[in-house]
Image: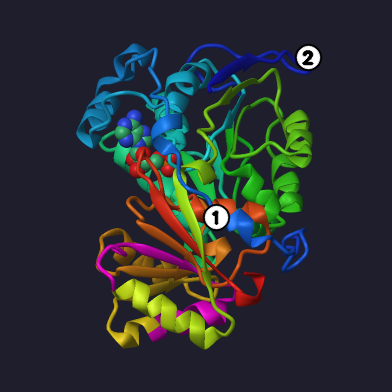
Amino acid sequence: MTKYNSRAASRRPATAGRKFSGSSRRNQKSSHRGAYIHPSKFINKATITTTETVYESKHTFKDFGFQSILQHNLDKKGFTKPSAIQDQAIKPILEGKDVVGLANTGTGKTAAFVLPLIEKLIGRPPQPTVLIMAPTRELALQINDEFKIFSQGLRLFSALVVGGTDINRQIRELKRGQHVIIGTPGRLRDLMNRGQIDLSKVACLVLDEADRMLDMGFVNDIRSIIQDLPEKRQTLFFSATITQSIRVLIDEFLTDHIEISVRTADTSERVDQDVLYANTKEEKLEQLIALLQSPEFEKTLVFGETKFGVQRLSDHIEKIGISSVAIHGNKSQPQRQRALRAFKDNTAKVMVATDVAARGLDIPNVTHVINFDQPMTYEDYVHRIGRTGRAGATGKALTFVPRNNQ
Ligand code: AMP
């Protein structure tokens, strides 16, 4: 179901037209480690064919009146019809309104904000005018890639400001001047503290996957970054869920915003879920390898609990002769990117990941998700299995549980 609400607030009038108006330690998750989840919650038969409804977009891309080079880039990318979030968000963003988008990865939310922001940036000088914050390096990189594709030939520049990369190189890059800064809150805060980013001209702030940023303990970084931005600005806020703490942020930082919800049917309805019984790690390994060797496990994402365990598991799978990569926080940014690319382009059949590393990633055609270690919360579980069963396909998720639960 799609809803399109206008909510009135009084602090600051919305601007119209195509112009812009104008370190803390990361906590672990707030939920308790290893909270018990009953195995029955890991079992469900997918009901996709009966619940999915096709969204009828009210606009074509031509209706948005993008300048010809941008429209050309859009055609070249092969986007023909706006997705639900694009259909509803592009116009208000072009008009300068604050927008809250309730949307998860896979809905086309990146282009929903990148396209109108590019349109508004065309012809402007290369100074930070748009600031985009994302929870993970990978998501920031995906946004930057999309920005580069759509801004080809428009002389618009962006800088990626994420952890795990050489800060001095980033400082040098920033000195060259960019229209858009895309970054993770920790590194952004760090650079601001060193006086190396000038955000005094930011006219639009985008918070992508705000719920994940809060989950990852970035709230203080976010707050202090926003406090340094001009008050007169446009703010776009994307989140898959709206919790009480998200609502507090929205009320604090957005003005006269509209809300757009494009949440699809619960992921759990689109994914065939079952459990695998095993009591020891060896038993789990034996079953996992047998599964990965069967042909239908074409592209499998395996979740583990610790960075170390994830790496070891991937090495083990690789040794058996099944191509596998690992993605976790102990890897450098280039290593993570290489791993992700190998999995995306099917060079690796298996990717083993921690929850945090896999968040928000857009990986098409994952056939199976296997929870080698159980997720800590049911919400994590839903995020994990949401990596499969996308874009109308039925995915499969398997979770190891101890046999004495039978
Ligand atoms: P996102 O939700 O932004 O991560 O996008 C998910 C995927 O959908 C990405 O691979 C996009 O390139 C793709 N996509 C976004 N919008 C469209 C569209 N209008 N038509 C076709 N593909 C799209």
Q: In the rendered image, which residue does mark 1 sit on?
A: 43
In the image, which residues are magenta? 294-316
Q: CA distance from mark 1 to mark 2?
A: 47 Å
Q: In the rendered image, which residue does mark 2 sit on?
A: 10
Please state if 90 lies on the left or on the right of 154 as rendered.
right
Q: Nearer the viewer, residue 167 or 7?
A: 7
Is 229 placed above or below 24 here? above
Type of amino acid under label 1:
Ile
Upstream in the sequence, badge 1 or badge 2? 2
Number of residues whose C-alpha sits closer than 10 Å to that of mark 2, classed few (under 14), some (14–19) or many (20 or more): few
- Image position, residue 165 (x, y; %): 49, 68
Number of residues whose C-alpha sits closer than 10 Å to that of mark 1, classed few (under 14), some (14–19) or many (20 or more): some
Q: Is residue 386 magenta?
A: no
Instruction: Kindly identify the residue that appears in the image at 69 percent across and 36 percent down.
Output: 242
- The quadrant of the picture occupied by the C terminus is bottom right
Type of amino acid under label 2:
Ser
